[in-house]
Image: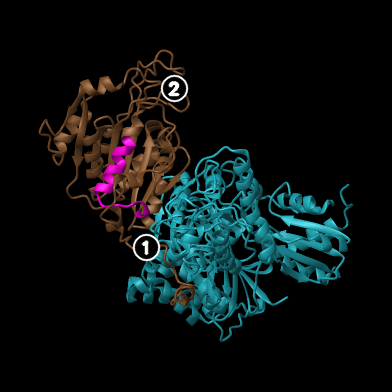
Amino acid sequence: MSSDVRFTDFKSDKQPTWCPGCGDFGTMNGMMKALANTGNDPDNTFVVAGIGCSGKIGTYMHSYALHGVHGRALPVGTGVKMARPDIEVMVAGGDGDGYSIGAGHFVHAVRRNVDMTYVVMDNRIYGLTKGQASPTSRSDFETSTTPEGPKQPPVNPLALALASGASFIAQSFSSDAMRHAEIVEKAIEHDGFGFVNVFSPCVTFNDVDTYDYFRDSLVDLEEEGHDPTDYEAAKEVILDSDKEYQGVLYQDENSVPYHEQHGVTEDMSEIPDGAPEDAMDLVREFY
Amino acid sequence: MAEDLNWAVGGEAGDGIDSTGKIFAQALARAGRHVFTSKDFASRIRGGYTAYKIRTSVEQVQSVVDRLDILVALTQRTIDENLDELHEGSAIIYDGERSWEAEIPDEMTAVDVPLKSLAEEAGGAIMRNIVALGAACEITGFDVEYLDEALEKRFGGKGSKIVENNKAAARAGQEYVQENYDLDHLGYNIETTDSDYVLLNGNEAIGMGAIAAGCRFYAGYPITPATSIMEYLTGRIEEYGGHVVQAEDELSAINMSLGAARAGARSMTATSGAGIDLMTETFGLVATSETPLVIADVQRSGPSTGMPTKQEQGDLNMALYGGHGEVPRFVVAPTSITECFWKTVEAFNLAEKYQTPVFLVSDLAMSVTEQTFPPEAFDMDEVEIDRGKLVDEDEVDEWLDAQGHFRAHAVTDDGVSPRAIPGTTDAAHMSTGLEHDELGRRTEAEDERVHQVDKRNRKVETARDDEDWDYREFGDPDADNLIISWGSNEGALVEALDYLREDGIDVHVISVPYIHPRPDLTEEIEAADETIVVECNANGQFADVIEHDVLTRVKRINKYTGVRFKADELADDITEKLSEEVPA
């Protein structure tokens, strides 16, 4: 790890094709800043992304990366981290990718508590397919596939994480650059699965969950004096559907990451030239 | 044909049938006897007919036959289910004190042993199966000390009291038969030798091959009959610095394995039928991201949930063609339990040398069958590991473009690009399932698309030229009749040769372990008068492939009852098929 890494070192020379004003620009910048601030460099960082606008992130960042299939980014990140505990793994996805097609993986990634960071760009809409309801869309949000609104409550990703046994739950707003980067930094530093739901507005298809809406409604938990290590307090804010919060909602101080629980600490990329020396023992077991 | 003995224990699932059979098989292997086991089981935990069959000989045995000499029957159904295989010289051990009235045909020898009460006297009713084993030893003239050794192995961990009780139970069964029956006229006498063999099944061989080949990460989701690969690796792979994850589903399993492989670990996942369907989504990603990954499919009867505990070789088309778009791949199908080991080792080398998915296609018959081998059959010194174009830090420069970007998908003559794993300085790059340029960056440019598709396909072409896509041959290579087979049918075919020879029919058998690429059999087929392709599916998926290669119609023997081929039955099928007209 080099100490002189700047966040721009994580920038690729490919120009993003996100719509002008898309929240994902800010989300990505914050991720890059947080990676640099925590002493990582592109050669020891692995970014995994799924499909959708959020999935493009691996293209615009410079690091080892994999752009996978829809909804499966978390399992890929899990595999990378298991094989290489020495590598910083960051998984990025969208609300569709993470809470719809990938919801099952989300629950299990949370409970495994693998030491990686999961950033979800939540714009409460399907953008790349041009404006259909997402699992976090409001129940009365009219879209091309839900002309009268989805008429079902949105997924509360924070509550889903809490119920699944999350050890770190945070929420940020892509436009509040400083706070967002700070929060992602805390997620990276967390010993375990660091989950950050980022309000990342879609300026093209979502005219409800806009920059103005979040700017006016967001309550910063740090200013409120919220203690994220207090589980009951965390539960209260996470289940409070009347307000939108930013900050670290919950952090388990006693979190033991997967690799420590399971003794997965070796660099699995190193193997001998032939069978291991004592491999005949494997055969003798069948005597 | 060697003098062999066919033994079986049958009862209800939950009766300890499997462990009873395994103990006897281990005792026989200890005594230098070759063993081939087969299992009949239903897809339920308790209840339902289940049986464990052992065929044993002083020579290597590789198939089941339609014959049963000694049967331990814990239920009437056990007798009924096996009536076809029982003969005049068969002995049936049963417990006459139990509530069922055993109906045993007169021509067979009924050996009524109070299994339960003798077991209780020895320390517990649970040991009634061991009493039966003692009785079987007496009938077959098998030295009960070998059974003692197997009991020590099995129960040693539970303390000496348990071991002693079991030995006493075996003695009780042996003595009861000695005192109450004179069975010398049956003529059974198990010869023993000084050799001793290892006894293992195909899934264990795959697991062992994976560890030997340096596999360090495995993610899977439990599914019959692939689960025992995961069970084998769990607890063992850790000793070599690896780890097994039971994923939430097959989609996760293959993606985790892909992640670990991308990060540089030799990585594998295994599943069966329905699980392969779910994994199909990711096949293309593995191929386009050029990630080395071994995907094992232990086939069972399909489609849908089909018959989960029954044999079939019906997923060949899936392995060959599964996935949207065009996915360059290798398909390797072990033909025996030893080949389950060696082909797994090879699968990892192919995956890394050519950076593409390798399908390792096995089947249920091989996965549950245990067979004896001299330990040298798995000589670990023979294991070679080829990691392909995995670049070191000092090789990175060669592969940078003018702007210093790593050309992870460099278009090369052989189609294989350099591979840099995370942590390699200055080689950071993105891998994607989107079409991409040499740097891994998305593109839809016509020429780039063509370059990358050609490049990926070229790896398979390179491998076709560079690797030995050989096959195994049996019988008479000059015979007019050619039999082609793949997968676990090989053993039954080899033994069928003996039956056919007795009837004066010579055949040339080719057993093919490589499905894609595969050996070119044009010459052999053209030289033969008749070609028959033998496989456990209804439509002849491999026969289709062969016909496509040689543009000639072949005859087909297809078994899709859910039960593997038996040597004697297969010999009859071949004789019958040879007399049929060649299809137009």
The amino acid at mark 2 is: Gln
Q: Quadrant of residue B33?
A: bottom right
* Same chain letter for marks 2 and 1: yes
Disc 1 secondary structure class: loop
**Residue farthest to the top, as pictured:** A148
Q: Residues within 10 Å of mark 1 (few under 14, many from 20)?
A: many
The amino acid at mark 1 is: Asp
Q: Quadrant of residue B365?
A: bottom right
Q: Which subunit holds the residue at mark 1? A: A
Q: Is residue B110 visible?
A: no
Which portion, as a residue range, is magenta?
A27-44
Gap in Å between the C-alphas at discs 2 and 1? 43 Å
Whether A43 is among the magenta residues is yes
Q: Is residue B538 visible?
A: yes
> In the visual, does B582 lie left or right of B112?
right
> In the visual, does A167 lie left or right of B281?
left
Chain B representation colour:
cyan
Residue A44 is situated, as x and y percent measured from the top left of the image, at 35, 55
| Residue identified by numbered label 2 | A132
Helix, strand or loop for the magenta stretch, by majority: helix
Precedes in sequence: disc 2 or disc 1 = 2
Chain A representation colour:
brown
Q: Residues within 10 Å of mark 2 (few under 14, many from 20)?
A: many
Q: Is residue B318 above or below residue B142?
A: above
**Residue farthest to the bottom, as pictured:** B194
Residue A64 is situated, as x and y percent measured from the top left of the image, at 41, 50
User: Cβ–Cβ below 8 Å for labels 2 and 1?
Assistant: no
Where residue B43 is drawn, which disc sits there? none
Position of the N terminus of chain B, as image quadrant, is bottom right
| Residue identified by numbered label 1 | A267
